[in-house]
Image (cartoon, rainbow, N blue to C red):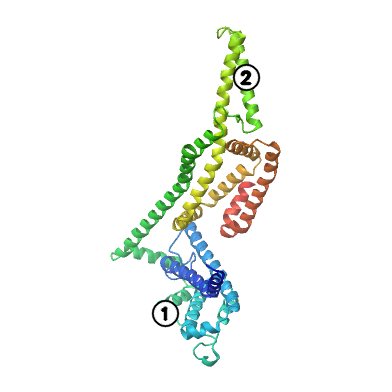
Amino acid sequence: MNIRSLFRDLRRWYVGTPDRALDEAYQGALRIKALEDEHFQGQPVSAAAGPDYCDRVLTYFEAEVKNQIRTINLRLAEFRATRQVVGQGDRLGEAGKEAAGIIIDKLNFIDQILNHYPTTAPSERKKSLSLIPVDPKNTAAVPQNPKPKPSPSILPKDKLASAGSKTGAVPRSILNTFSRVKRELDPQSVGSEGEVVKKFRQARDRTAIAIKFLLLLIIIPLLTHQLTKTFIIEPLIEKQFFTTHSEIVFLNQDLQEEAFIELEHYEKTLKFTTMLGLTPELSQGEIEVKIKEKADELASNYRRRGASAVANVFADICSLLAFGWVIMISRREIQVLKDFIDEIVYGLSDSAKAFLIILFTDMFVGFHSPHGWEVILEGVSRHFGLPESRDFNFLFIATFPVILDTVLKYWIFRYLNRISPSAVATYKTMNE
């Protein structure tokens, strides 16, 4: 691929950015509409319109709507920004009135959906309509202030939503309860039973896919690590560098001191048991022979430890590559796992959420966390055969938990306080 074709592809991609951004915003509006039709009888997502959903389910639905609205606003901003830069004369000349009509219909549909929720800014959406170019020779084809032409399937639901938003003599929740009881007692509700069974099967399949994928994320890297280390990397390293007659015995000074202490302890134990009469009395030559045998045994053990530590580095790289490969080929499973985790998290009560947050913070950034970090750092150094540095350990413990605590507090303030304020209130109460 030469440079000219590369620039041509980049230009084609950038010119198509407005249409691509508008399509993503339109898809987000369709998702919100599907959510309203499936669970809220075509009305906006709210506690009053829901058929007696519990607070956790309503929180989940509201979070889904907020995520889609955020995506819609971002894509509309991208649509406006790129629409002002990309030239539109040729595009209108090719597409004509049909392309402009499609854009207007999509923007009108997005506007209808966003009008159901007061968090969106109407002035921001009007900017998108103002960016649609109009052919001065054919102004009748594309009006300046186009009125939406809703399909027959959309119009009655909008009327229903506007009528339901008015205050009546009887609360809508009571009416929804009677409608639900009537629907459950209706002998002709075979379709609804089938729909419930279908939704249950879909939820069961999603749970099975999420658990299987989570197990694959754990098992495949571990298997890759063990197989590559045991059968490929470690035999090569032992053969090349850590043979019996090799001069390399210890990887670092800490391992050497550890071996000397173990050998000295063995010599003192041997003399002590001889003095107590627990073992037959040995001459000086026999003691030296036993000490030499112990030294050879220690040298063999520490050569294996050194070879294992070096092999761990390459085996970990192979396991990371296997983990990345699983992630790359499993886009659908990742989305299912994300939805599964979101459902579990949103399904927790406020006290359970606060309990997990306190448990995590006390374990990793609490008063007793330095001891745990010391154990983790010592295990990492032993795993890779690195010398232990107390200065590095103290510096790490003095900085990383503080950074982690700051990030966690920012996440609680920025996101959790907006998604679940009651969980934040419970967390503060439990902390006090």
Question: Taking 122 as reference, is 67 above or below it?
Answer: above
Q: Residue furthest left?
A: 187
**Gap in Å between the C-alphas at discs 1 and 2?**
88 Å
Give the quadrant of residue 172: bottom left
Q: Residue at x 63, y 56 (%)?
A: 413
35 or 394: which is nearer to us? 394
Mark count: 2
Q: Which mark is residue 61?
A: none
Q: Say above or below: 263 vs 316.
A: above
Taking depth in this image into account, of 191 and 333 the one nearest to the observer is 333
> Could you tell which of marks 1 and 2 lies nearer the N-terminus?
1
Q: Secondary structure at mark 2?
A: helix
389 or 305, nearer to the observer: 305
Q: Residue at x 48, y 85 (%)?
A: 96
Label 1 crowd (10 A; few <14 / some 14-19 / many >=20) = few
Name the one closer to the observer, 218 or 193: 218
Asked if residue 389 lies left or right of residue 238, the reply is right
Residue 252 visible in the shown view: yes
**Residue at the far bottom in the pictured view:** 137
The amino acid marked with disc number 1 is Ser
User: Which residue type carries mark 2?
Assistant: His
**Percent coordinates x, y for residue 319 in the rendering:** 50, 45
User: Is residue 148 among the parts visible in the rendering?
Assistant: no
Q: Position of residue 359 (x, y in %)?
A: 58, 44
From the image, tell me which residue sits under label 1: 151
Q: Which mark is residue 265?
A: 2
